[in-house]
Image: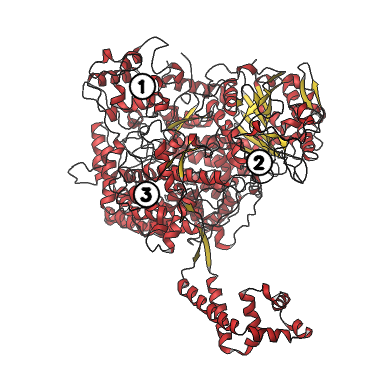
Amino acid sequence: MNTEHDLLQRTRRHFFGECGIGVGSMALANLLAGNDSAAAAEIAGSMLAPRETQFPARAKRIIFLFMAGGPSQLDLFDHKPLLNKMNGEPMPQSYLEGKRFAFMGSSHRTNLLGTRRRFSQHGDCGAWVSDLMPHTASIVDKLTFIKTCKTDLFNHAPAKLFMNTGSGQFGRPSLGSWLTYGLGSECADLPGFVVLQSGPRGPRGGSVLWGSGMLPSSYQGVPLRNKGEPILNLTTPESVSSEQQAEVFAAVRALNAQRLAATGDEEIATRISAYEMAYRMQTSAPELMDTSGESKETLDLYGIKDPGESSFARNCLLARRLVERGVRFVQLYHTNWDHHGGVTENLEQHLPAVSQEVDRPGMALIRDLEQRGLLEDTIVIWGGEFGRTPMGEVRESTGRNHHIDAFTMWFAGGGLKPGVTLGETDEFGFGPVGDSVFVRDIHATLLHQLGINHERLTVRAQGLDFRLTGVLPARVVHEIIG
Amino acid sequence: MRQFHSRFSRGIVWSTCLWFAALPGWQPQVSAEELIYNRDVRPILSENCFSCHGFDKSKREAGLGLDTQEDSVAVLESGHAAIVPGKPEESELIRRILSGDHDEVMPPAESGKHLTEAQKKTLKDWVLQGAKYDKHWAFISPSKVPAELTTNPIDHFVKARLTAESISPSPEADRITLLRRVSLDLTGLPPSLSEVDDFLESSQTDSETAYRQLVERLLQSPAYGERWGRWWLDQARYADSNGYSVDAPRQIWKYRDWVIDALNRDLPFDQFTIEQLAGDLLPDATVEQQVATGFHRNTQINQEGGIDPEQFRIDSVYDRVATTGTVWLGLSVGCAQCHDHKFDPIKQREYYQLFAFFNNQEEPNLTVYDSDIDAPSLLEERRQLEAQMQEVVRNASGRTADWEAQLTADQRKSFAKDVQKILDTNKDKRNAVQERSMYAVGPGASDEEFQSQLKRWDEVSKLLERNTTTLVMKELAKPRKTTVFIQGDFTRPSEEVNCGTPSVLPPLEDVGDSVDRLDLARWIVSPRNPLTARVIVNRIWQQYFGRGLVETENDFGLQGSTPSHPELLDWLAVDLTEKGWSLKELHRLIVLSKTYRQSSAERSDLHEKDRNNYVLARQRRLRLDAEIVRDVSLSSCGLLSRKMGGPPVFPPIPQGVMGLGQANRAWNVSEGEDRYRRGLYTFIYRATPPPSLSVFDAPDGYSTCTRRVRSNTPLQALALMNDGGFFEFATALEKLIKQEGLAAAFRRCTSRIPSDSELAVLEKLDTLSAARVLLNLDETVTRE
């Protein structure tokens, strides 16, 4: 029976057995001798404690390599020879009826644009990859490609929000928040949901992309910063010694404990355990960031020349270090993939440059996770908020517009079928042949692999049960599950 | 049976009740007594059945609707009727909920919903008793139940329920706790040390009078408007930038100041509402009334390249409809944007009738002149001066041309730069101001009357520079056409609609030829509207007790929770309108009640009976709102500036915060007292909000916030411990420790005298550490 009592017992078991969080609050709760808020105090402190899944999980954690701006699948993974043959010719009108695009009033055009990239087949699976991604090409047998991803929104900020929260509206929880809410964290010293950024600027949309929406802020993503202290306010003020800092933490704890005894308010127990985690983070986060213990071999694999310098490669290494420590959801944003054809954003120069920035580190992350036995229960995702059109844009140089009907993402690990490609696009790479894989389907599949039925992970707000996958029917993409 | 956690499959209630089934408002033991539909039956149907058998006819499974009696007794395609009143054994509904067959049982297993045995019995008994339906409670006008009120009505109704449940109330909180509580609740500021002393002293002679005088003083304090202004700004989704990805700064702080001022002068809530929703449409609208319409200009503006502006204009109208519904009506009308509402009787067509009210505006900037100049007469004077001068200049144009033609090259060079520039401009291309300048340096140089006019013009213009702009609403001369959008998709217009209100609520009154926002605003605060007063009373109540009488403060619809004290809610709602919608009266009534003044200490007996304090047998400790965490720290360390209003300020924030947005915007730290202003004056960029506020759950301004989450996280601990701003406050408090001693500093933070054991902990530390500890105490950031 799923009674309250059972829930309480199960939670207590987690609390005492596995998570290690809140040992302090347990002791403090004993101050309330004779008051049965003792159990409650322990539990209140464990909002992030690990929780059982609904059914056996194939994966425990996710690393999402978010290619912010919308990578051109037609120059990377989706090989369309006809596009080159018909370069410059108009897109057949039948494809375009009823469609809307970004920049409709200005630079949007309808003539086809071939690719300058050379495509070839790789691995045993024979996946097509262009010459921009040689390292990724070397691991295609470990990857699962979906070529018919479909999203609903074609402007950057709303589409990024959609990929993260399943909605273009602000105020919904992001994937990482849902996971830490549903599953808790397996790491007592670091947040359960961590965000890393690289590239010339922050992703459009900013902090809402890792926001917790109507879930408590305990579940929102914590950005690890590239410069200065890795977590905001992590560093003890300059004029304070580490002994003084420890004394302050101890005194806060002692006085809060006295107040807990006086009032019996279990929120104080929660605050005490929050301070304990904060104190541990002051040590654990710098340790996380200190990559000096990594071998030269490892650094070379990722292509890291200067470990102190911020880069996508370093963030990939940090992602591995984070999941090693039990962090549930790690998201890396890399800008900028928005290759419209402007002076600073074209397919000739800028697409190759950004591809090179991510190609080797992505490969390295997969191999590194695999070597350490982490890939089998870690899902790695590579993709952006949308793809790009087969038609070219007329700007200063060559580029493509935003496209939402069919774009490519790849996945690895976590019980997904390796060396598989799902879905096929039409001869121009414009729309799917057959079924689309909607963003909500991707979300449902990810939750499924982590042991959650997407229809049952809900939060009540505004009188409704909200869920990541929204109101339209979503399906688990069983074709890619091993 | 599958093992799953409570967060799987059902909604949960936050914070401390996270792990325990929440006790809904009023859950009587079901006996052979007559069941009441709204109280006993509807919550079960709404939670378990309406999503497939509810108001949205297009989504009804098997053609069955259980939301009305008419539909529930109809014979279905299967030949059965779901309900045969009085005959549970013939009712398909009862057969299916009791069925042991996996394929038949309702609700179906895959829905994740599940009826308890007690719920099944309730439904069966209800059918047996005739399956009577009632109108939803919130759609019936509130009325005051006749009651002998010898005490504060709040205490009367709360006590009635406590007595019914055999629970005793808690004693009054001690004087200092009470003083700090009511000060923080009414003004967002803790009492000063001398205020504590004064209150203790006056309490010794007559404690009741002392408390009443305290409440009056606090209600008259300008800080009242700041504290409750921020409460309203949450609902108005106020921020200082445009949002979306570009998130450029905007100027709308005049609206914020309007809110603070309106609350301080206790502008009746009906007028407060009308001015914000339609101040521009009032006859002879004042500047202030136009400023008030900034309420609905707090929507985001997307400045990203490549967008279709119409899409985002419509998004902002959607937001206005949803916000109006949530804030005033407590209804999630936004749910009817794409389809008929699944739970509440709001049709998609009616949604777009509401939409039509907000579809006819332009969105201008209004120039607001400082109050210390007489702008209307200055503007008129300037207009007259310009007309007079222009006349002179025009009449002298020939003379000016002759004068200019005779100028030598050297003479031309002798003039000031700006004059030379005009001389270099082709005569045909000069504007009126340039022509005036030519005359002034030329033939007009000796025209004394003209020169004195010009001098005055300069003075007047200089005075008129004392202005600011703010975003306001303005009705379009020619209304836009409004249609239903299929699936809420603005590229798929269908049936055209006019302004209108949902038919489940009373109709619009006294409307003339054209219906506009003003009619909507008046309808919202009409005495016949059953929702508005209840919703506002409830939302104010929530601030004082941590939860509303209706827990779902933004949903009074069929999915919302039942009031814990329905008669009290209705009494307060009716009383609010009877007392001319005075919010200060309502605040006074609440804080003077014994219910409010109870101790917040946990009680072991309540732990069993009413863990989550639904019956209000005690007060509750509440962590302070983000801005007030700042205000209390500033106040405790003596740095707080009490300057009110004006442009938002830039207190120090950690480096790199602004770089997290798409555009790395400047944050030039304010100097002087602006560094130490109350939290509600801090500039809020929506995309990169100040971390020390957002970490304590300050709303993001993206959509209306009618209840703040109160989280309790390690990042809050890091902020209070290490953030540069809080550290600066600690150094200031350290100085006070050196001057006044540890005990005084402790009192500055908590208002109370520390115990010996507490002092002992602090005395072991150096003074700076002690100051940091004090600002980090749970008690310092909590109102007890």
* Visible residue check, residue B705: no
Q: Is residue B630 above or below residue B15?
A: below
Which residue, given by chain and number where applicable, does mark 2 sit on? A203
Rendered residue at 42%/11% (across/down): B103
For mark 1, give the secondary structure.
Answer: loop
Labels 2 and 3 within one chain: no
Q: Amino acid at mark 2?
A: Pro
Q: CA distance from mark 2 to mark 3?
A: 40 Å
Q: Which chain hosts label 3?
A: B
Classify residue B70 as left or right of residue B285. left
| Viewer-side label of 2, 3 | 3
Which residue, given by chain and number where applicable, does mark 1 sit on? B64
Residue B777: x and y, percent? Answer: 50, 44
Observer-nearest of B734 and B97: B97
Classify residue B149 as left or right of residue B506. left
Residue A460: x and y, percent? Answer: 44, 31
**Counting other residues with Cα less than 10 Å from the Cα at mark 1, is it few (<14), some (14-19), or many (20 or more)?**
many
Q: Is residue B93 above or below residue B418?
A: above
Which residue, given by chain and number where applicable, does mark 3 sit on? B520
Q: CA distance from mark 2 to mark 1?
A: 47 Å
Q: Amino acid at mark 1?
A: Leu
